[in-house]
Amino acid sequence: MGRVEGKVIVVTGAASGLGLADARMLVAEGARIVMTDVNVEKGVELAKEIGAMFVHQDVADESGWTALMSTVASEHGRLDGLVNNAGIARIANIEQTTTEIWRETLAIHLDGTFWGCQTAIKLMKQGGGGSIVNMSSTAALVGIPAYFAYSAAKGGIRSMTKSIAIHCKQQKLGIRCNSIHPGSISTPMVHHALRELVGVDLTAETDPEKTRIALGVGEPDDVAHMVVYLMSDESKHITGTELVIDNGDTVA
């Protein structure tokens, strides 16, 4: 049996990057996955490919979260895990950040994570517990000037996670909540950053794998392995923790 055999888990932003890697590995380990994304065409195609269910969702829409959890309850009868992965990263420092960039970034990251956790807890309580993983970033720990709004949002997710973990522990809900803080991982978001900030197009390199290693950029599966662990019963004593996956960059 797989490490998360039979568990019902929602993964947001699952049509690409880290969300897709998480969903794919969780399915391989026996989970019943509900993938969500704003990209319907790609989401439907990939869900079919890996053997998951797809639901169209804008995480910044509160009503969408209520509808999603109703679908999960009717289709599966319970919820065991939630991976709040959906996000955006607009390149703009404090002087360049517009109100539009600021509000859009915080809506997707902070509002989305808040509503996701709130609605998930309500459903998880009915089943006696579960695990929530909130995707933060090393930007929450050190701050990245070129990603001002993103850094602020990820810092909020870090604190939100700890508050939720303590609440669930105090209320004896059997629900764990942890945050993951990836550094540079080979995803479309990081590829864009490399092109815009350092002039390296990783996907266009003659040997992208060699360049990835030389740049110290990790693979999506490096994060997915941690997600599987936190969704599994192996991590039953871990909550309120921030897990950094950055090859030591934040301590170097």
Image (spheres, rainbow, N blue to C red):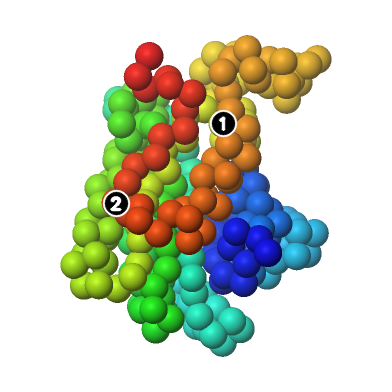
Who comes first in sequence, dot 2 or dot 1? 1
Mark 1 crowd level (few <14, some 14–19, many ≥20, 10 Å Cα): many
Quadrant of the rendered image containing residue 96: top left
Q: Going by the image, does 9 lie left or right of 156?
A: right
Compared with 240, 141 (above or below) is above
Q: Quadrant of the C terminus?
A: top left
**Residue 209 position in % (x across, y down):** 73, 21
Q: Position of residue 172 (x, y in %)?
A: 25, 72
Q: Nearer the viewer, residue 177 or 110?
A: 177
Q: Nearer the viewer, residue 28 or 66?
A: 28
Q: Note whether residue 1 is visible.
A: yes
Going by the numbered disc 2, the residue's amino acid type is Gly
Residue 59 visible in the snapshot? no
- The numbered mark at residue 240 is 2
Q: Quadrant of residue 217?
A: top right
Label 1's element?
loop
Reading the image, the residue beneath label 1 is 185
Which mark's residue is nearer the viewer, 2 or 1? 2
Q: Is residue 198 left or right of residue 44?
A: left
Could you tell me how far apart the alpha carbons at marks 2 and 1 are, in whole angstroms? 23 Å
Q: Residues within 10 Å of mark 2 (few under 14, many from 20)?
A: many
In the image, residue 199 sits, relative to residue 23, either above or below, namely: above
User: Looking at the image, which residue is at 56% across and 31% down?
Assistant: 185
Q: Hey, what amino acid is under mark 1? A: Ile
Residue at point 43%, 81% (across, down):
127
Q: Is residue 133 above or below residue 102?
A: below
Q: Secondary structure at mark 2?
A: loop
Q: Position of residue 208 (x, y in %)?
A: 74, 20
